[in-house]
Amino acid sequence: MALLCLVAEEPMHAYRMQQLIKERHKDDVVNVAQRNSVYQTIERLLRDGLIAVRGTSREENRPERTVYELTGTGRETLKQWMRTMLSTPAREFPEFPAALAFLPGLEPGEALAALRERLNSLEARLSTLDGELAEGRTFLPRVFLVETEYQRAVVEAELGYVRALVDDLRAGEVTWDFRF
């Protein structure tokens, strides 16, 4: 979806796609840590007829780059994916709820220490998101910040939940004396 959206903006080469994803902080919601994953996705999109090769170019001493463009089928598929993703909650399996489900796998003190570390990470993430939103609002229309707003709301909610759980563990309201 991310790559289809980029080539819908304008035809471009794979490296530019990856650059834009990082510049726009979309790598917070799209995993492009491995450059190879972009190329593998491009191959699938080409195979499925969702994008096409527009041409190749070479600039100065750089390697030849293939420029891709969206096909009509790609545009319709992108719209359908977007409608589905926006309208239908997906059944996802994040790690944190799974860890909570098996909390007695640790001693209560170990769980408390791990949750305190999570609190620190969540507070840092919230601060980062606040900075990204403040900066983005200075030059971007809100539509380009809604995923960051969503991420911030999710992190804030998780932070509130983990704080309450830590308080309950400290107070002895959540405890166990067995381990799996």
Image (cartoon, rainbow, N blue to C red):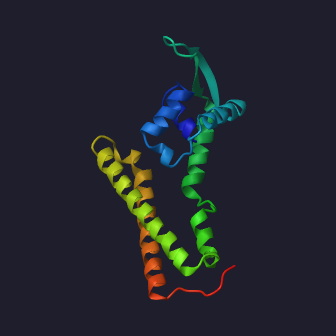
Q: Position of residue 67 (x, y in %)?
A: 57, 22
Farthest residue to the right: give it. 47
Q: Establish if 7 lies above or below 112.
A: above
Residue under the image location 33 percent in, 45 percent down: 136
Q: Nearer the viewer, residue 57 or 84?
A: 57
Q: Is residue 50 visible?
A: no
**Figure quadrant of the C terminus:** bottom right
Quarter of the figure that contains the N terminus: top right
Name which residue lies at 54% across and 75% down.
Answer: 111
Asked whether, in this view, residue 23 is left or right of residue 52, the answer is: left
- On the image, the x and y values in percent for residue 54 come to 59, 19
Evaluate whether residue 46 shows in this view. Answer: yes
- Residue at horizontal 55 percent and vertical 40 percent from the top: 2
Q: Quadrant of residue 141?
A: top left
Depth check: 75 or 130 in front?
130
Please indicate whether residue 86 sits to the left or right of residue 53 in the image: left
Left or right of 126? Residue 107 is right
Residue at image position (58%, 79%) is 107
How many marks can you see?
A: 0
Q: Give whichever of 76, 37 is nearer the camera.
A: 37
Q: Relative to 157, does residue 8 appear above or below in the rendering?
A: above
Q: Position of residue 38 (x, y in %)?
A: 60, 35
x, y percentage for residue 72? 61, 31
Give the quadrant of residue 119. Answer: bottom left
